[in-house]
Amino acid sequence: MSHILAAATAAHPGPWFMPAGADDLASLEWRGDPAEAPDMAAVAAAVAAYTPPGRRRLTPREFRERLTGAEQHAMLAAAFGAPDPATRIAAGTLLLRAAEAQEIDLDNPEVAAGLDHWVAAGVLDPARKAALLADV
C-alpha cells in the first residue's frame, strides 16, 4: 500500500482507490457515498504529515549491521573463548539461530531474550538492547 493511501485511510477510513503503481495525491479517488466524501484538503494535510511506521522485521544481515564491530567481536569471543562451557554453548546457539533465521522479528520475545543474554554477559548494555529493538 502506498504511503498516500495509508495516510488517507488513517485520516478518513473508507473505500479509497489508487491505481497500481500510482504514488501521487491526484491519483487518489474516493469510491464511497458522495455524502461521506472527505474534505480533500484535510486528506492532503494528513498525507503531508504522515510518517510510515518503522520496519520491525529485518534480515539477519540487517540486524547484524546494527551491531558495532566491538559488539560483534565480543559476541564471537563469548561463543568461542568464554572459559565457561555453558556460556560458550548459549552464546554459540544464539549466534547460530540468528544466522540461520530467515528474518529477525524485533517483536519476537525470543529476540529480546537473546539480547538479555548479551546484556547479562556484559556484551551489551541495556540502552543498546533498546536501540537494537527500535524501529528501523
Image: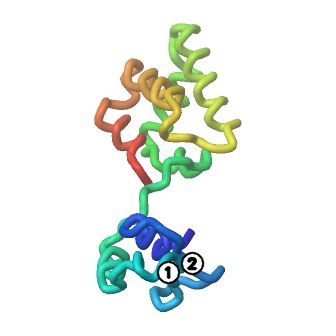
Quarter occupied by the N terminus: bottom right
Q: Residue at image x 33%, y 74%? A: 46
Badge count: 2
Q: Is residue 37 left or right of residue 114?
A: left
> 92 or 73: which is nearer to us?
92
Proximity of marks 2 and 1: CB atoms separated by less than 8 Å: yes
Q: Which mark is residue 94?
A: none
Q: Earlier in the sequence, mark 2 or mark 1?
A: 2
Q: Position of residue 20 (x, y in %)?
A: 65, 80
Q: Residues within 10 Å of mark 1 (few under 14, many from 20)?
A: some
Residue where numbered disc 2 is placed = 17
Q: Residue at image x 61%, y 49%? A: 59
Q: Which amino acid type corresponds to the residue marked 1 in the rendered image?
A: Trp
Label 1: state its secondary structure: strand
Q: Which mark is residue 30?
A: 1
> In the image, is residue 11 above or below residue 29?
above
Q: Residues within 10 Å of mark 2 (few under 14, many from 20)?
A: few
Q: Position of residue 14 (x, y in %)?
A: 48, 68
Distance, label 2 to label 1, CA atoms, is 6 Å
Q: Residue at image x 40%, y 28%? A: 123
**In this view, the mark in front (2 or 1):** 1
> In the image, is residue 122 above or below residue 6?
above
> 35 or 5: which is nearer to us?
35
Q: Residue at image x 53%, y 71%? A: 15
Outermost residue toward the bottom?
A: 26
Q: Which amino acid type corresponds to the residue marked 2 in the rendered image?
A: Phe
Label 2: state its secondary structure: strand
Q: Position of residue 81 (x, y in %)?
A: 55, 20
Q: Quadrant of residue 88?
A: top right
> In the image, is residue 91 above or below residue 2?
above
Q: Position of residue 124 (x, y in %)?
A: 37, 31
Quarter occupied by the C terminus: bottom left
